């Protein structure tokens, strides 16, 4: 193969210079992306320096008109050196590419570990929707459907476990409220739970269950009321009636008015009889206590007016020394 002349050889330098600039540019980009990627930039710098040094020498030899054979020999050496630089640049580029691929594999594994850790953290905080989103992201990014499905199953299991635990705790609170007849508080707890787990069958059934307990307790009170009235347990009847007050509808209350009036009338009659007996037996303090009870519970009754007329006298008698005659 015919060796290139000095004149024709000088055309190679612009090409080599462009290649060196390209290597330099790629190296500069890699350094900006990753501060540890200096190899390609250094190679570009070496190439530019080599071209910058050898090109003037070749031009000088050509311009000086040196012996053609000597010029060819020098140019050939320069050409060989440039070819070696180009070969080295190619190998460095291939090595850099392999290094980038290796790093890409390493970074990919780190990314997988990072998403795995993030999924576990979200599950630990009870952020189930975020954990599901990360599992979907894991499948899309790495194509690992089996592992993503395993994450989804674990998320679902832990979510159900946490949900059931919370439901059990709230149901226990509702039980305490219903046992103490705090129905409004019980309903409020059920509503708060429904806001979080509206699709859960147990949660959806809670309001009806609370109302069923309320109606059952109301039924028991009504039965106790009728039994107390039947055995003329006046005090017991009145106490049950007070408890029934918050359960009765307007129609139910009206239907019980006559019976209730009879109970209260009997209560007043009993107090009046006890008041009279206490006076007759000169038990003044007892008479005062019963009289005050009549005035307090039946302030608008005729019996309360009659008691009021006697209270001054009773207090005078109660203040007299023991053994004093009436």
Image (cartoon, rainbow, N blue to C red):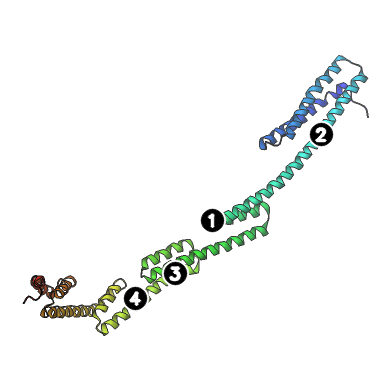
In space, the residues marked 3 and 4 are separated at their CA atoms by 18 Å
State if disc 4 and disc 3 touch (CB < 8 Å): no
Q: What element carries label 3?
A: helix
Quadrant where the C terminus sits is bottom left
Mark 4 or mark 1: whose residue is earlier in sequence: 1
Which x, y percent locates residue 127?
54, 56
The residue positioned farthest toward the bottom in the image shown: 231
Which label sits on residue 88?
Answer: 2
Residue 248 in view (yes/no): no
State if disc 2 and disc 1 touch (CB < 8 Å): no
Residue 188 versus residue 87 in the image, above or below: below
Which label sits on residue 127?
Answer: 1
Residue 28 versus residue 218 in the image, above or below: above
- The residue positioned 88% from the left and 22% from the top of the image is 74
Nearer to me, 12 or 299? 299
Q: What element carries label 4?
A: helix
State if disc 1 and disc 3 touch (CB < 8 Å): no
Which x, y percent locates residue 203?
47, 67
Mark 3 or mark 4: whose residue is earlier in sequence: 3
Which label sits on residue 206?
Answer: 3
* Picture quadrant where residue 155 is located: bottom right
In space, the residues marked 3 and 2 are separated at their CA atoms by 78 Å
Q: Mark 4 points at which residue?
A: 218
Dot 2 crowding, Cα within 10 Å, few <14, some 14–19, many 20+ = few
In space, the residues marked 3 and 1 are separated at their CA atoms by 25 Å
* Picture quadrant where residue 69 is located: top right
Mark 1 or mark 2: whose residue is earlier in sequence: 2
Dot 4 crowding, Cα within 10 Å, few <14, some 14–19, many 20+ = some
Residue 168 in view (yes/no): yes
- The residue positioned 79% from the left and 34% from the top of the image is 89
Q: Is mark 2 on a helix, strand or loop?
A: helix
Which x, y percent locates residue 227?
29, 83
């Amino acid at each position: 193969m015919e060796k290139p002349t000095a004149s024709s050889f000088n055309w190679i330098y612009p090409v080599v210079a462009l290649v060196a600039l390209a290597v330099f540019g790629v190296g500069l980009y890699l350094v900006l992306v990753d501060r540890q990627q200096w190899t390609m930039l250094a190679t570009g710098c070496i190439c530019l320096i080599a071209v910058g040094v050898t090109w003037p020498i070749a031009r000088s030899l050509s311009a000086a008109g040196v012996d053609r054979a000597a010029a060819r020999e020098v140019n050939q050496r320069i050409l060989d050196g440039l070819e070696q630089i180009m070969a080295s640049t190619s190998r460095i580029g291939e090595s850099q590419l392999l290094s980038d691929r290796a790093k890409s594999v390493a970074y990919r594994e780190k990314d997988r570990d990072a998403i795995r850790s993030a999924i576990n953290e979200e599950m630990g905080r009870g952020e189930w929707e975020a954990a599901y989103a990360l599992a979907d992201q894991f499948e899309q990014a790495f194509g690992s459907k089996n592992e993503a499905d395993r994450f989804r199953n674990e998320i679902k299991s832990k979510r159900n476990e946490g949900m059931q635990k919370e439901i059990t705790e709230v149901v226990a609170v509702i039980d305490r409220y219903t046992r103490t007849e705090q129905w409004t508080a019980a309903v409020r707890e059920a509503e708060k739970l429904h806001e979080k787990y509206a699709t859960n069958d147990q949660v959806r059934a809670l309001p009806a269950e609370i109302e069923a307990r309320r109606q059952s307790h109301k039924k028991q009170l009504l039965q106790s009321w009728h039994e107390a009235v039947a055995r003329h347990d006046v005090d017991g009847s009145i106490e049950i009636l007070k408890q029934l007050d918050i359960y009765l509808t307007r129609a139910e209350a009206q239907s019980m008015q006559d019976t209730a009036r009879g109970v209260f009338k009997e209560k007043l009659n009993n107090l009046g009889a006890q008041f009279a007996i206490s006076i007759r037996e000169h038990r003044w303090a007892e008479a005062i206590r019963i009289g005050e009870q009549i005035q307090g519970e039946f302030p608008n009754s005729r019996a309360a007016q009659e008691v009021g007329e006697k209270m001054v006298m009773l207090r005078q008698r109660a203040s007299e020394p023991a053994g004093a005659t009436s």
